[in-house]
Image (cartoon, helix red, strand yellow):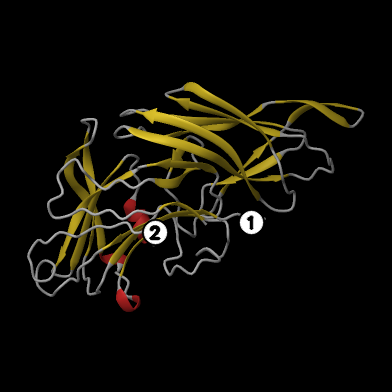
Amino acid sequence: MLFAGALLLALSAGAEEGEPLEPELAISFNMKDDDLTLSPQNKLPDEPETVKRVNAQYDEILTIRRDQQPVNVGEWASDSVKYSREILIEEANIWWQEIDEGYGNNNCEWVFYVKVNDETVQESSHDCGQRSDEEPYRSSYSLGTSLTLEENDVFSVEITYEGTEDVNIYYDNITYDTGYTVKSKPLSFYGGSGGGGSVVIEFTEAWPVDWNTNLKGGYVMLMGMDGYMGDNTQASVSEGAEHEMTNGTIATGTVITWNGVVGNELKIMLHYTQFDHMGGGGNGTNGTTNDPLVTLTIVTTATISDDSGFLGLPGFPLLLAVPALAFAARRCR
Protein backbone atom coordinates (compact mmCIF):
# COMPACT_ATOMS: atom_id res chain seq x y z
CA MET A 1 0.00 0.00 0.00
CA LEU A 2 1.31 3.39 -1.03
CA PHE A 3 0.28 6.14 1.37
CA ALA A 4 -0.61 9.28 -0.53
CA GLY A 5 -0.48 11.24 2.69
CA ALA A 6 -1.56 11.47 6.27
CA LEU A 7 -3.17 14.61 7.58
CA LEU A 8 -5.29 15.80 10.43
CA LEU A 9 -7.52 18.64 9.37
CA ALA A 10 -10.70 19.97 10.86
CA LEU A 11 -13.65 22.14 9.99
CA SER A 12 -14.71 23.84 13.18
CA ALA A 13 -18.02 25.47 13.92
CA GLY A 14 -16.55 28.77 12.81
CA ALA A 15 -15.06 27.58 9.52
CA GLU A 16 -15.43 30.34 6.98
CA GLU A 17 -16.96 29.94 3.56
CA GLY A 18 -14.24 29.49 0.95
CA GLU A 19 -12.04 27.42 3.26
CA PRO A 20 -13.25 23.87 2.66
CA LEU A 21 -11.37 20.73 3.53
CA GLU A 22 -9.66 19.68 0.28
CA PRO A 23 -7.58 16.51 0.71
CA GLU A 24 -5.37 15.37 -2.13
CA LEU A 25 -6.53 12.02 -3.49
CA ALA A 26 -5.10 9.54 -5.94
CA ILE A 27 -8.11 8.34 -7.93
CA SER A 28 -8.68 6.28 -11.04
CA PHE A 29 -10.22 7.95 -14.09
CA ASN A 30 -11.76 4.88 -15.70
CA MET A 31 -12.19 4.30 -19.41
CA LYS A 32 -15.96 3.89 -19.79
CA ASP A 33 -17.80 1.52 -22.10
CA ASP A 34 -19.15 4.33 -24.30
CA ASP A 35 -15.57 4.52 -25.64
CA LEU A 36 -15.69 8.28 -25.10
CA THR A 37 -15.60 9.04 -21.40
CA LEU A 38 -13.02 9.08 -18.60
CA SER A 39 -14.66 9.16 -15.18
CA PRO A 40 -14.02 8.36 -11.50
CA GLN A 41 -17.45 6.70 -11.59
CA ASN A 42 -17.43 2.92 -11.32
CA LYS A 43 -20.03 0.32 -12.13
CA LEU A 44 -21.80 -1.80 -9.53
CA PRO A 45 -20.08 -5.07 -8.56
CA ASP A 46 -22.33 -7.30 -10.68
CA GLU A 47 -21.98 -5.26 -13.88
CA PRO A 48 -19.75 -6.82 -16.56
CA GLU A 49 -16.59 -5.45 -18.10
CA THR A 50 -16.18 -4.27 -21.68
CA VAL A 51 -13.73 -6.08 -23.98
CA LYS A 52 -12.29 -4.43 -27.08
CA ARG A 53 -10.23 -6.31 -29.66
CA VAL A 54 -7.36 -4.37 -31.21
CA ASN A 55 -6.13 -5.87 -34.48
CA ALA A 56 -2.42 -5.36 -35.09
CA GLN A 57 -1.21 -4.04 -38.43
CA TYR A 58 2.14 -5.21 -39.79
CA ASP A 59 3.93 -6.54 -42.86
CA GLU A 60 4.57 -10.28 -43.10
CA ILE A 61 7.29 -11.79 -45.26
CA LEU A 62 7.92 -15.55 -45.18
CA THR A 63 6.00 -15.85 -41.88
CA ILE A 64 8.11 -13.07 -40.35
CA ARG A 65 6.08 -10.17 -39.04
CA ARG A 66 7.77 -6.78 -39.22
CA ASP A 67 7.24 -3.05 -39.70
CA GLN A 68 4.20 -2.86 -37.44
CA GLN A 69 2.06 0.24 -37.86
CA PRO A 70 0.21 2.21 -35.16
CA VAL A 71 -3.43 1.28 -34.67
CA ASN A 72 -5.81 3.70 -33.02
CA VAL A 73 -7.31 2.17 -29.86
CA GLY A 74 -9.48 5.16 -29.01
CA GLU A 75 -9.66 8.43 -27.13
CA TRP A 76 -11.40 8.89 -23.80
CA ALA A 77 -12.11 12.35 -22.33
CA SER A 78 -13.10 13.61 -18.90
CA ASP A 79 -16.19 15.65 -18.23
CA SER A 80 -15.49 19.37 -18.10
CA VAL A 81 -14.08 20.37 -14.73
CA LYS A 82 -16.50 22.45 -12.64
CA TYR A 83 -13.82 24.66 -11.12
CA SER A 84 -10.07 25.07 -11.57
CA ARG A 85 -7.92 22.17 -10.38
CA GLU A 86 -4.29 21.08 -10.59
CA ILE A 87 -3.91 17.43 -11.57
CA LEU A 88 -1.04 14.99 -11.97
CA ILE A 89 -1.65 12.08 -14.33
CA GLU A 90 0.74 9.63 -12.71
CA GLU A 91 0.32 6.51 -14.80
CA ALA A 92 -1.76 4.66 -17.34
CA ASN A 93 -3.15 1.26 -16.32
CA ILE A 94 -4.24 -1.24 -18.95
CA TRP A 95 -5.76 -4.66 -18.45
CA TRP A 96 -4.93 -6.53 -21.66
CA GLN A 97 -4.35 -9.97 -23.08
CA GLU A 98 -2.54 -11.16 -26.17
CA ILE A 99 -4.63 -13.27 -28.51
CA ASP A 100 -2.53 -16.39 -29.00
CA GLU A 101 -1.98 -16.93 -32.71
CA GLY A 102 1.13 -19.05 -32.34
CA TYR A 103 3.48 -16.13 -33.01
CA GLY A 104 5.90 -15.77 -30.12
CA ASN A 105 7.73 -12.49 -30.74
CA ASN A 106 5.36 -9.58 -30.23
CA ASN A 107 7.52 -6.47 -30.02
CA CYS A 108 4.76 -4.05 -29.12
CA GLU A 109 4.31 -0.62 -27.61
CA TRP A 110 1.58 1.70 -26.41
CA VAL A 111 1.61 5.41 -27.18
CA PHE A 112 -0.39 7.83 -25.00
CA TYR A 113 -1.30 11.32 -26.25
CA VAL A 114 -2.42 13.51 -23.33
CA LYS A 115 -4.58 16.42 -24.45
CA VAL A 116 -6.27 19.47 -22.95
CA ASN A 117 -9.24 20.73 -24.94
CA ASP A 118 -8.15 18.59 -27.93
CA GLU A 119 -4.60 20.02 -27.94
CA THR A 120 -1.81 17.47 -27.37
CA VAL A 121 0.40 18.47 -24.44
CA GLN A 122 2.42 15.25 -24.04
CA GLU A 123 3.23 12.14 -26.07
CA SER A 124 4.54 9.12 -24.20
CA SER A 125 5.65 5.78 -25.73
CA HIS A 126 6.08 2.61 -23.69
CA ASP A 127 7.19 -0.90 -24.51
CA CYS A 128 4.35 -3.25 -23.63
CA GLY A 129 6.50 -5.02 -21.05
CA GLN A 130 5.22 -8.16 -19.38
CA ARG A 131 2.16 -9.64 -21.01
CA SER A 132 0.04 -12.80 -20.95
CA ASP A 133 -1.93 -14.79 -23.49
CA GLU A 134 -3.58 -16.92 -20.80
CA GLU A 135 -5.50 -14.29 -18.83
CA PRO A 136 -5.87 -10.51 -18.68
CA TYR A 137 -2.84 -8.81 -17.17
CA ARG A 138 -2.62 -5.34 -15.60
CA SER A 139 0.28 -3.24 -16.89
CA SER A 140 1.14 0.25 -15.65
CA TYR A 141 3.06 2.90 -17.57
CA SER A 142 4.46 6.08 -16.03
CA LEU A 143 3.19 9.35 -17.51
CA GLY A 144 3.92 12.05 -14.92
CA THR A 145 1.86 14.72 -16.68
CA SER A 146 1.01 17.84 -14.66
CA LEU A 147 -1.92 19.92 -15.87
CA THR A 148 -3.62 23.12 -14.75
CA LEU A 149 -7.30 22.90 -15.64
CA GLU A 150 -9.55 25.95 -15.61
CA GLU A 151 -13.32 25.86 -15.33
CA ASN A 152 -14.88 23.86 -18.22
CA ASP A 153 -11.53 22.46 -19.40
CA VAL A 154 -11.45 18.83 -20.55
CA PHE A 155 -8.47 16.50 -20.48
CA SER A 156 -8.31 13.39 -22.64
CA VAL A 157 -5.92 10.61 -23.58
CA GLU A 158 -5.68 9.01 -27.01
CA ILE A 159 -4.06 5.56 -27.23
CA THR A 160 -2.39 3.82 -30.13
CA TYR A 161 -0.98 0.28 -30.23
CA GLU A 162 1.87 -1.06 -32.36
CA GLY A 163 2.51 -4.78 -32.37
CA THR A 164 2.55 -8.06 -34.24
CA GLU A 165 -0.16 -9.77 -32.17
CA ASP A 166 -3.81 -8.85 -31.80
CA VAL A 167 -4.82 -8.00 -28.23
CA ASN A 168 -7.94 -7.63 -26.12
CA ILE A 169 -8.35 -4.72 -23.71
CA TYR A 170 -10.58 -5.15 -20.64
CA TYR A 171 -12.13 -2.11 -18.96
CA ASP A 172 -15.00 -0.46 -17.12
CA ASN A 173 -15.97 -2.59 -14.16
CA ILE A 174 -14.82 -3.13 -10.58
CA THR A 175 -12.04 -5.58 -11.49
CA TYR A 176 -10.70 -4.02 -14.67
CA ASP A 177 -9.67 -0.49 -13.72
CA THR A 178 -8.18 0.38 -17.10
CA GLY A 179 -7.60 4.13 -17.13
CA TYR A 180 -5.36 6.63 -15.40
CA THR A 181 -4.18 7.21 -11.85
CA VAL A 182 -4.66 10.92 -11.20
CA LYS A 183 -3.66 12.95 -8.15
CA SER A 184 -5.86 15.95 -7.50
CA LYS A 185 -8.30 17.51 -5.05
CA PRO A 186 -11.62 16.40 -6.58
CA LEU A 187 -13.75 16.86 -3.44
CA SER A 188 -14.13 19.93 -1.21
CA PHE A 189 -15.93 19.33 2.10
CA TYR A 190 -18.06 21.98 3.81
CA GLY A 191 -18.95 20.30 7.07
CA GLY A 192 -22.19 18.69 8.09
CA SER A 193 -24.62 18.22 10.92
CA GLY A 194 -26.27 15.47 12.92
CA GLY A 195 -29.22 15.02 15.21
CA GLY A 196 -32.63 13.46 15.52
CA GLY A 197 -31.32 10.23 14.02
CA SER A 198 -29.84 11.90 10.92
CA VAL A 199 -26.34 12.67 9.66
CA VAL A 200 -25.66 15.09 6.81
CA ILE A 201 -22.47 15.94 4.93
CA GLU A 202 -21.93 18.38 2.08
CA PHE A 203 -19.18 18.68 -0.52
CA THR A 204 -18.52 20.01 -4.00
CA GLU A 205 -17.10 17.90 -6.83
CA ALA A 206 -14.73 18.98 -9.56
CA TRP A 207 -15.96 15.99 -11.62
CA PRO A 208 -19.46 15.03 -10.40
CA VAL A 209 -20.39 11.36 -10.17
CA ASP A 210 -23.59 9.47 -9.30
CA TRP A 211 -23.57 9.12 -5.51
CA ASN A 212 -26.84 7.19 -5.56
CA THR A 213 -24.96 4.47 -7.45
CA ASN A 214 -22.07 4.73 -4.99
CA LEU A 215 -24.44 4.33 -2.04
CA LYS A 216 -26.10 1.34 -3.70
CA GLY A 217 -22.72 -0.29 -4.34
CA GLY A 218 -21.55 0.25 -0.76
CA TYR A 219 -18.83 2.63 -1.92
CA VAL A 220 -19.95 5.04 0.81
CA MET A 221 -20.48 3.85 4.38
CA LEU A 222 -21.58 5.36 7.67
CA MET A 223 -20.04 3.32 10.48
CA GLY A 224 -19.75 3.42 14.25
CA MET A 225 -18.76 1.53 17.36
CA ASP A 226 -19.42 -2.20 17.84
CA GLY A 227 -19.73 -2.88 14.12
CA TYR A 228 -22.58 -0.42 13.57
CA MET A 229 -23.25 0.34 9.92
CA GLY A 230 -25.74 2.91 8.67
CA ASP A 231 -28.44 1.76 6.27
CA ASN A 232 -27.67 3.14 2.80
CA THR A 233 -31.25 2.43 1.74
CA GLN A 234 -32.19 5.21 4.17
CA ALA A 235 -29.65 7.60 2.64
CA SER A 236 -30.45 10.19 0.00
CA VAL A 237 -28.55 12.56 -2.28
CA SER A 238 -29.62 16.15 -2.91
CA GLU A 239 -28.32 19.51 -4.03
CA GLY A 240 -26.65 21.68 -1.43
CA ALA A 241 -25.75 25.33 -1.19
CA GLU A 242 -23.74 27.36 -3.67
CA HIS A 243 -20.08 27.77 -2.73
CA GLU A 244 -17.52 30.19 -4.06
CA MET A 245 -14.33 28.40 -5.02
CA THR A 246 -10.84 29.89 -4.82
CA ASN A 247 -10.95 31.21 -8.40
CA GLY A 248 -14.37 32.80 -7.95
CA THR A 249 -16.29 29.97 -9.64
CA ILE A 250 -19.64 29.16 -8.03
CA ALA A 251 -20.17 25.42 -7.43
CA THR A 252 -23.30 23.73 -6.13
CA GLY A 253 -22.74 21.33 -3.26
CA THR A 254 -23.75 17.67 -3.10
CA VAL A 255 -25.49 16.60 0.12
CA ILE A 256 -25.74 13.03 1.43
CA THR A 257 -28.20 12.44 4.28
CA TRP A 258 -28.51 9.29 6.36
CA ASN A 259 -31.72 8.77 8.35
CA GLY A 260 -32.48 6.28 11.10
CA VAL A 261 -28.97 6.62 12.55
CA VAL A 262 -28.44 5.18 16.04
CA GLY A 263 -24.69 4.49 16.17
CA ASN A 264 -22.03 6.07 18.35
CA GLU A 265 -18.58 7.45 17.44
CA LEU A 266 -19.52 7.60 13.80
CA LYS A 267 -17.29 7.85 10.77
CA ILE A 268 -18.13 8.24 7.10
CA MET A 269 -16.03 6.52 4.48
CA LEU A 270 -16.29 7.75 0.89
CA HIS A 271 -14.88 5.95 -2.11
CA TYR A 272 -15.37 5.79 -5.83
CA THR A 273 -15.19 2.01 -5.68
CA GLN A 274 -15.39 -0.89 -3.23
CA PHE A 275 -13.05 -1.04 -0.28
CA ASP A 276 -12.12 -3.12 2.73
CA HIS A 277 -14.16 -1.25 5.35
CA MET A 278 -12.82 -3.49 8.12
CA GLY A 279 -9.26 -2.47 7.33
CA GLY A 280 -8.09 -6.06 7.13
CA GLY A 281 -6.01 -5.72 3.99
CA GLY A 282 -5.38 -8.78 1.86
CA ASN A 283 -7.92 -9.51 -0.83
CA GLY A 284 -10.21 -6.80 -2.10
CA THR A 285 -13.91 -6.92 -1.49
CA ASN A 286 -14.56 -8.55 -4.85
CA GLY A 287 -12.20 -11.41 -4.06
CA THR A 288 -9.27 -10.14 -6.11
CA THR A 289 -6.05 -8.37 -5.26
CA ASN A 290 -6.08 -5.86 -8.09
CA ASP A 291 -8.60 -3.25 -7.02
CA PRO A 292 -7.59 0.38 -6.67
CA LEU A 293 -8.49 1.64 -3.22
CA VAL A 294 -9.11 5.32 -2.49
CA THR A 295 -10.32 5.99 1.02
CA LEU A 296 -11.40 9.28 2.55
CA THR A 297 -12.39 8.81 6.17
CA ILE A 298 -14.32 11.52 7.98
CA VAL A 299 -14.56 10.94 11.72
CA THR A 300 -17.12 12.58 13.96
CA THR A 301 -15.79 13.44 17.38
CA ALA A 302 -19.20 13.55 19.01
CA THR A 303 -22.10 11.18 19.53
CA ILE A 304 -25.59 11.67 18.15
CA SER A 305 -28.08 12.11 20.94
CA ASP A 306 -31.78 11.38 20.87
CA ASP A 307 -32.41 15.10 20.76
CA SER A 308 -31.54 17.48 17.99
CA GLY A 309 -27.88 18.23 17.49
CA PHE A 310 -24.83 16.64 19.04
CA LEU A 311 -24.47 16.35 22.78
CA GLY A 312 -27.89 17.94 23.08
CA LEU A 313 -26.79 21.13 21.33
CA PRO A 314 -29.08 21.92 18.38
CA GLY A 315 -27.27 22.42 15.13
CA PHE A 316 -23.80 21.62 16.51
CA PRO A 317 -21.75 20.96 13.36
CA LEU A 318 -19.70 17.87 12.68
CA LEU A 319 -16.00 18.19 13.36
CA LEU A 320 -14.53 16.70 10.22
CA ALA A 321 -11.14 15.07 10.33
CA VAL A 322 -9.02 13.16 7.86
CA PRO A 323 -6.70 11.08 10.06
CA ALA A 324 -5.32 8.98 7.23
CA LEU A 325 -5.58 9.12 3.48
CA ALA A 326 -4.32 6.14 1.56
CA PHE A 327 -4.14 4.90 -1.99
CA ALA A 328 -3.34 1.30 -2.76
CA ALA A 329 -2.94 -0.07 -6.24
CA ARG A 330 -2.89 -3.83 -5.84
CA ARG A 331 -1.68 -5.78 -8.82
CA CYS A 332 -1.69 -9.43 -9.73
CA ARG A 333 1.76 -10.73 -10.57
Residue visible at 17% across and 55% down in the picture: 12
Residue found at the far bottom of this picture: 226
Q: Is residue 121 visible?
A: yes
Instruction: Indicate whether 308 appears above or below 62.
Output: below
Q: Secondary structure at mark 1?
A: loop
Residue visible at 56% across and 32% down in the picture: 74
Percent position of residue 187, x then y: 31, 46
Tell me which numbered mark, 1 or 2, is placed earlier along the sequence. 2
Q: Quadrant of the C terminus?
A: bottom right
Q: Residues within 10 Å of mark 1 (few under 14, many from 20)?
A: few
Residue visible at 81% across and 42% down in the picture: 101
Label disc, if present, on residue 332 of the rendered structure:
1
* Left or right of 319 in this view: 48: right
Percent position of residue 181, x then y: 49, 43
Which dot, 1 or 2, sits closer to the camera? 1
Q: Say what amino acid the circle numbered 2 marks.
A: Tyr
Q: What residue is disc 2 on?
A: 219
Quadrant position of residue 331: bottom right
Residue visible at 30% across and 69% down in the picture: 231
**In front of the other: 282 or 200:** 282
* Left or right of 111 in this view: 78: left
Quadrant position of residue 140: top right
Q: Say what amino acid the circle numbered 1 marks.
A: Cys
Percent position of residue 116, x then y: 44, 25
Q: Secondary structure at mark 2?
A: loop
**In front of the other: 82 or 10:** 10
Instruction: Indicate whether 124 appears above or below 92.
Output: above
